[in-house]
Amino acid sequence: MDLFVAKETAFQQRDRKIVAYEDLEIGVFRLDGNFYAYRNQCAHRGGPVCQGKILEKVEEVIAQDKTSQGLKFSQEHIHIICPWHGYEYKIKSGLHPGNKQVGLKKYDVKLRDGGVYVVL
Ligand code: FES
């Protein structure tokens, strides 16, 4: 079954929408022109992860002499941060950045006639 989320034009870049179907909530994200959908349930303790902040990954800049040059925001990796205890997940994969065994349940997304749909 295809669950309608919104018109494609209703999504801004780095936008997100939450859609509900029966007892299921799914967060749908638009990032770099692509769509990603995950169950709105954190792998830690079930928090509403898809409603958390969307932020760039923080990376440490290391010089050739191995000294730290401080921190910077990644231009490549964008994370969703669970509002309950701060677990982070990569929006493009749904995986925790430090533990690939921890991740969100992923759904396929279809674009049809200008609409965005989650495949259930
Ligand atoms: S429930 Fe998401 S970090 Fe704990």
Image: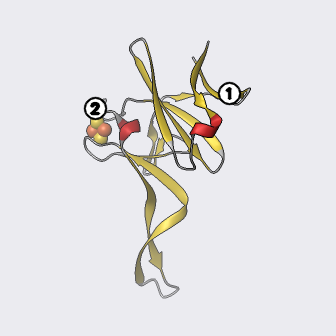
Q: Looking at the image, is 113 positioned above or below residue 31? A: above
Residue placed furthest toward the right: 113
Q: Position of residue 39 (x, y in %)?
A: 45, 28
Please name the amino acid that badge 1 sits on. Lys
Q: Looking at the image, is 101 positioned above or below residue 81? A: above
Q: Quadrant of the N terminus?
A: top right
Q: Which mark is residue 45?
A: 2
Residue drawn at point x = 56 percent, y = 46 percent: 12
- Disc 1 target residue: 110
Q: Position of residue 106 (x, y in %)?
A: 53, 30
Residue drawn at point x = 46 percent, y = 76 percent: 61
Q: Quadrant of the C terminus?
A: top right
**Any atom of ligand 1 within 8 Å of the CB at mark 1?**
no
Q: Position of residue 105 (x, y in %)?
A: 48, 29
Q: Residues within 10 Å of mark 1 (few under 14, many from 20)?
A: some
**Any atom of ligand 1 within 8 Å of the CB at mark 2?**
yes
Q: Residues within 10 Å of mark 2 (few under 14, many from 20)?
A: few
